[in-house]
Amino acid sequence: MDVISEVIGTIRAGRPSALRVRQSGTWGMYLPGIEGMGFHVVLKGTGWLITPSGQPVPLNAGDVVLVPHGVEHGLSHTAAWTIDGLPDLELPSAHPVTEPAAFDVVLGCYRLERGRIHRFLRELPPVITMSPDYDRHPETRMLIEMLVADMAEDLPGAAVSRSALVDLTLVHALRHARGHTRLGAWPEVTDPGIAAALNEMHTSAQRPWTLGQLSTIAGMSLTAFKRRFTLLVGTPPMTYLTDWRLTHSARVLRETKAPLAAIARQVGYSSEYAFANAFRRKFGIAPGRFRDRMTHEPTRPGRAPVPDAEQA
């Protein structure tokens, strides 16, 4: 069980989006905070990353900006602008842009409607800029090219391909970010007993697990297992199991039309009623309403790290 896989697994309970923005002349865009995780990839030109605190950061073609926990920030043609002075991002027209632009950027994100940002993401710097070595990692360049091509037109299966490409882009961004010296201390669960218990939770969430059963899988006493699990994972085992079940159920609600009763059984609840109560406690909304909001509500253009456009 590695941290990046777990992070991507939790944010996939949200709604993915990707948007391409082209700017020329005097331009700026304010991107306010959301509950979610975002990224930007500069395809062409130069600009500046504007944050509420700290100096503006220059951006060049190929640079990647990772926004681990959705803080407000902005992009601009000049370092002179402050975060408060940036204009709102204007969503691009539905008509194709034919004229060349000075600055070309992809904005992508996962917006969590009600969920919580993974604790490892909250521990990262609010905004991370990277200049990947595309010669050493040509797969990163190919991935970005695939994402841009997928966004160019709405083809059958776009909802699936866009989500997958946003997932992969975030995976590669996190891998690059992890290579940064400040991020090298990210813990991984290398203890074989704890890893075995985590694997059972993830692959067999439907089983009515008890703390005793999980400690037996880990090959530890109940007390030692609870203490070791909490130390390595950051939360007690049964709390982690509940969070995983409900996060997984949110993803199933978003991605499938499975009945609520079937989803309840899939994530280890004996009844739809018990599942709905637990889901409401975690997300603040009933599972049926959550599904409706994630799949049927119209997009509302807004000031967000990445607009929640219906392009993913």
Image (cartoon, helix red, strand yellow):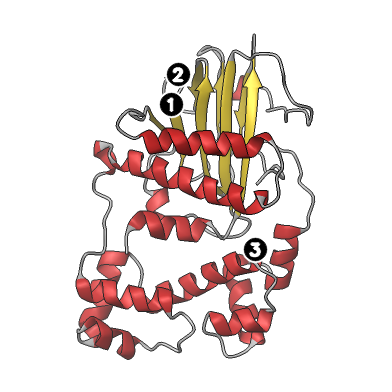
Quarter assignment of residue 124: top left
Task: Give the spatial CA distance, label 3 vs label 2.
Answer: 36 Å
Amino acid type assigned to the residue bearing label 1 in the image: Asp
**Quarter that holds the N terminus:** bottom left
Q: Earlier in the sequence, mark 3 or mark 2?
A: 2
Q: Which residue is mark 3?
A: 254
Q: Which residue is mark 1?
A: 63
Check whether the beta carbons of the residues at disc 2 and disc 1 lie within 8 A of each other: yes
Callout 2 environment at 10 Å: few (<14), some (14 to 19), or many (20+)?
some
Note whether residue 306 is visible.
no
Q: Which residue is mark 2?
A: 60
Q: Residue at x 72, y 45 (%)?
A: 310
Amino acid type assigned to the residue bearing label 2 in the image: Asn
| Image spot of residue 263 (x, y percent) | 61, 79
From this viewpoint, which residue is outermost toward the front? 156
Q: Is residue 154 above or below residue 152?
A: below
